[in-house]
Image (cartoon, rainbow, N blue to C red):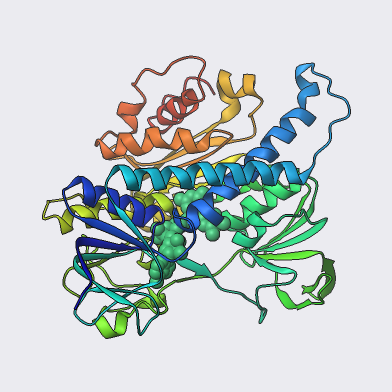
Amino acid sequence: MPESSYDCIVIGSGPGGYVAAIRAAQLGMKTAVVERADTVGGRCLNEACIPAKAILRVADAYKEVVEAKGFGITVSGVEFDYSGATAHRDKVIKILTGGVGMLFEKNGIEVIKGHGSLTEDGNVKVGGSFDGDELEAGKVILATGSIAKPLLGLQFGGCVLDTAAMWLSAEQPQRLAVVGAGASGTEVASAFGRLGTEVTLIEALDQILPLEDKDVARACAREIAKQNVKIVTGANVESAEDSGDGVRLVLDGEPQDFDLLCIAAGRAADVEGLGLDEAGVKVGERGLIEVDGALRTSKEDVYAIGDIVPGPALAHKASDEGVIAAEDAAGLATHPIDYPFVPRVTFCSPQVASFGLTEEQAKEAGHDVVVGKVPMGAVGAPTVYGDRGGMVKIVGDRAHGEILGAHIVSAKAAELIQELVVARDLEGGFPELARSIHPHPAFAEAVLEAARATDGWLIHG
Ligand SMILES: Cc1cc2nc3c(=O)[nH]c(=O)nc-3n(C[C@H](O)[C@H](O)[C@H](O)COP(=O)(O)OP(=O)(O)OC[C@H]3O[C@@H](n4cnc5c(N)ncnc54)[C@H](O)[C@@H]3O)c2cc1C
């Protein structure tokens, strides 16, 4: 007999799970969240997005002080102590995870500590995989996230870290190899390089940020290379050996020694011991749970969201799926997600933000492609700020004025991309954006100019 009963039980309290739980509670469902970690907020808040951004912020601040001379400010005796950075990181994690706990309380959501799994009849067991207390669940939302997978025949531990361990480490390495120059690896390189670590950023493909538009990746690489980071693309790591004191990589025939190796490639859905087989939840390619547009799995009344289902592994995608799953579970009509148009940001310096198609993808898809490209330095605000190295690039469809994709490199790219996302969501194209008045001097004028350039009448350039 189940010991308790809920309308909705969410397993996992990350950005997918906690948002789903809050939305379910808002809609009147008696809701519980099962979380096995000591703190709520998931990997995002405890070991991934948030600690990463906290350390990256320290790197920004440090660089601003060191480079203040360019503004006529002389600062002598600048010193950096990594323990100050970790204190900032830990404080931020504590504030934000505490905030999630408060939101649970405010919304009357019960947090149940333990490992959650599905039973055959779609209820939830809390405890081990084959024992524990059974809770009756009207609806279940699975939101258990993903875990890093080691490469090169290595195990994590010792001098081989995944990105979470890298961001949570208490010490700053002197020589760091980062394998994988996607968003996570490039963030690690940009943070630690600017804080004084000698970084080698290694990528098997021919550009860093391999999923990004070529122009944008090139502009970003130019800036990253100035940050104590040696970029090696088209690289072949032949072997890697952890000696306990350091790691020796054989890279394109050359042995190279590092204090630490951070593997920033390869993640897998965290579904072990979740009882998927027993409950009859179908798993598809790459071990991801199969879902429909409302995040329903093959098992009635069981939903799955976030990193355990297909689509970009991003926190805001997980949260949006949480809203959709909870609304569908409550019997409401909800909105679909257009996955290629989910915005994505790499928080290196400068930031890289994009959504939709790259120029190459738009051409391959047969669009009548028009491109508007503007350097950040074309307008006033980025020049005042000292952010001339980046660019805004809009990929459009000439015939319909549709924004097919947008790609930004700038200190404020994460904020700037949203204007383009909203324009598209509200069915605006680049011709409309080109005639939308922007304040002066603002970074967003670069977006305005890129829209004008796409529409064929760039003013500043
Ligand atoms: C280093 C790094 C940096 C990142 N930075 C960004 C970023 O800047 N922006 C961005 O959008 N995305 C970023 N991501 C991706 C982002 O972290 C994930 O997409 C997001 O955390 C997924 O959310 P989720 O809710 O699916 O799962 P998670 O955040 O992984 O949370 C899952 C939770 O479920 C719990 N759990 C797992 N199994 C069970 C079980 N059986 N029972 C009970 N509890 C369980 C886990 O303990 C965990 O707390 C980053 C990822 C990494 C690794």
425 sits left or right of 199 in the view: left
Is residue 211 at all visible to an observer of this figure? no
- Residue 159: x and y, percent? 75, 69
Q: Residue drawn 54% across and 45% down? A: 94
Is residue 361 at all visible to an observer of this figure? yes
- Residue 236: x and y, percent? 70, 73
Q: Is residue 110 above or below residue 258?
A: above
Count of labels shown? 0
43 sits left or right of 423 in the view: right
Q: Tell which of 143 and 64 is nearer to you.
A: 143
- Residue 427: x and y, percent? 24, 37
Q: Is residue 306 above or below residue 244?
A: above
Image quadrant in which you'd find residue 61: top right
Q: Residue drawn 55% across and 21% down? A: 379
Q: Tell which of 37 and 69 is nearer to you.
A: 37
- Residue 312: x and y, percent? 41, 59
Of the 4 image quadrants, the one containing the N terminus is bottom left
Q: Tell which of 75 and 223 is nearer to you.
A: 75
Image quadrant in which you'd find residue 167: bottom right
Q: Tell which of 196 and 183 is nearer to you.
A: 196
